[in-house]
Amino acid sequence: MVPSTGRLTEEPRGSASDTAGVVVFGCCAAWALITSAGRDARPEGMLLALLAVAAGYAFGRIGGALLPVAVPAAAALAGAFAALAAPGSLPGAVVMVPPGHGGAEAAQLALAAGSACCAAWAARRTGTRTVLRLAAAGTAVAALLLGSPVGCAVIVVVLLCSAAVAPARRRAPVLAGCALAAALVAGGTLATAGGALPEGLSATVEGRLTEHRVLLWRDALGLAAERPVLGVGPDGFGALSETVRNTPGSDGKPHSAPLQLASEQGLPGVALLGAAFCWTLVALGRSPRSTPVVLTAGASLTVLAALAGVGNALSFPQVTVAAGLLAGVATSRPLTYGTAPGPAAAAAPDGALPAVHREGDGMPAEGAPGS
């Protein structure tokens, strides 16, 4: 019930996770500058990607607090339209082998589906939820009809994950599973590049990924082995990769975010990428939003991490902005109509939200870590 005062207040939350995020992303930017010092390197791409994530995250935090349904719904619509209706207009898209555009399109569709599902969980009316979920399912069908089976598959995965987390009450096990899934994809990429997979499995994987991409991965792994600390410098892979030199029209990227960072910024760069993803999961675990919203966002971002492990999805600014926006919406601090926090609120358990706040699923938002 809304208190009679009708004042708009923000739920009290600690700022430890926000501070940690600033530190992690600040270190990412600083390390990009350090590894480019005194070299013919271009850290602008890395810095712009970090700026895109930060901008999307800030907008998501604000929009998610003010309009928890409208903002993610609009983001889902914009992402689906950009991926399906105007694929040729995506900045940075290169039509070549292997095409980077396909990975960016699939990543946008995964994030759009996640945004739609988060909006559905935040909606109070059953009809609104149904419309949003049907829209996401319709996007999967459209992706399949327009020749993007991977895009269709990732949307289905996000929808299934969103439905599966409905009865979940504890976040930590699911978010730990997300971290494990991302680590397995990164480990599989490394094993493929290093030739550590069994012969039969290796042939199958190379057939699915194309030999060209595997050769790019091996070049990246070789450069990382030669310079494990500082790498060859941001945006330096293309100039030193033999596969890139032998491929006319190549975009100069290894089509794997972990291997690109390993080759260009050394092992510390990979560690910072992992730290950024882990921080996102921790921030989701501490979010005051309802558990279905949090876990749906976590699943969508894990799908993005998997796509980034085997492609160059993170090289596209529209993908990084959408990822930041989804994370911001899912970690936003809801604004409610009520009194400012007083003694009663101070007496509540650490991380608990006042009873006045309700997500659209009809349950109190679960803000305590591990809830």
Image: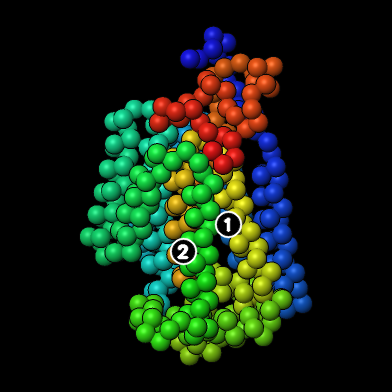
Between 86 and 154, which is closer to the camera in this rendering? 154
Marks 2 & 1, CB-CB < 8 Å contact:
no
Q: Residue at x 47, y 45 (%)?
A: 295
Residue pointed to by mark 1: 277
Q: Please name the amino acid that badge 2 sits on.
A: Ala
Q: CA distance from mark 2 to mark 1?
A: 12 Å
Q: Residues within 10 Å of mark 1 (few under 14, many from 20)?
A: some
Q: Residue at x 50, y 41 (%)?
A: 170
In which quadrant of the rendered image does the C terminus lie? top right
Residue 243 got which mark? none
Residue 358 image position (x, y, % from top left): 47, 26
Q: Residue at x 50, y 83 (%)?
A: 196
Please, what secondary structure does the residue beneath circle 1 have? helix
Residue 330 image position (x, y, % from top left): 51, 42
Residue pointed to by mark 2: 306
Residue 369 image position (x, y, % from top left): 59, 40
* Image quarter of residue 47: bottom right
Q: Please name the amino acid that badge 1 sits on.
A: Phe
Residue 235 image position (x, y, % from top left): 61, 74
Q: Is residue 368 left or right of residue 203?
A: right
